[in-house]
Amino acid sequence: EVGRPYIMSKGVPKDRVKVLRDAFMATVKDPAFLKDADKQHLTVISPMSGDEAQKAVEAIYDSPPQVVAAAKKITGD
């Protein structure tokens, strides 16, 4: 679900996390940014907010042991 996440330490103050998340979302919606990305043949598809990404990662970490075991079997881990 999370293609190219930007991550930071848990120790980053919440107000800074909010500023960075807001700036990221503003950037991926900015027409000039999108035009430049298009010129470089880069596709910006459905950017996920920081809150959404955090919830997705938390869901992965909350996976039941049998799901983790099945994933390890599939990946050969």
Image (cartoon, rainbow, N blue to C red):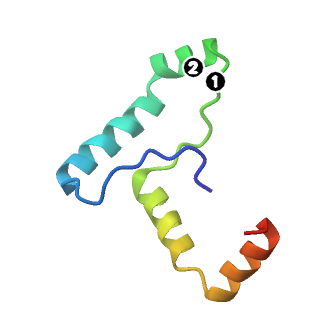
Name the spot of residue 26 as percent of width and height, x first: 38, 34
| Circle 2 residues within 10 Å: few <14, some 14–19, many ≥20 | some
As rendered, which of 36 and 77 lies closer to the eye? Answer: 77
Query: Compared with residue 65, is residue 13 higher up or lower down, i.e. above or below?
Result: above
Q: Secondary structure beneath disc 2?
A: helix
At a point 46% along the width and 16% down the height, the residue shown is 32
**Residue that numbered label 2 is attached to:** 37
Which numbered circle lies on residue 72? Answer: none
* Residue type, numbered disc 2: Ala
Confirm or deny contact between disc 2 and disc 1 (CB under 8 A): yes
As drawn, is 43 to the left or to the right of 55?
A: right
Give the image location of residue 59, x and y in percent: 53, 73
Residue shown at the point (66%, 79%) measured from the top left:
68
Q: Which quadrant holds residue 72? A: bottom right
- The residue labelled by disc 1 is 42
At numbered mark 1, what does the secondary structure look like: helix, strand or loop? Answer: loop
Q: Earlier in the sequence, mark 2 or mark 1?
A: 2
- Residue at the image position 63 percent from the left and 87 percent from the top: 65
Q: Camera-side residue: 57 or 39? A: 57
Which residue is pictured at 52% across the width and 79% down the height? 62
Q: Locate residue 66 relative to residue 59 in the image: left or right.
A: right
Residue 6 location, x and y as percent?
Answer: 44, 44
* Amino acid type shown at disc 1: Leu
Within 10 Å of disc 1 (Cα), the crowding (few <14, some 14-19, many 20+) is: few
On screen, residue 64 above or below 36: below
Relative to the observer, which residue lies in front, 27 or 12? 12
In the image: residue 65, left or right of residue 23: right
Q: Position of residue 51 (x, y in %)?
A: 40, 58
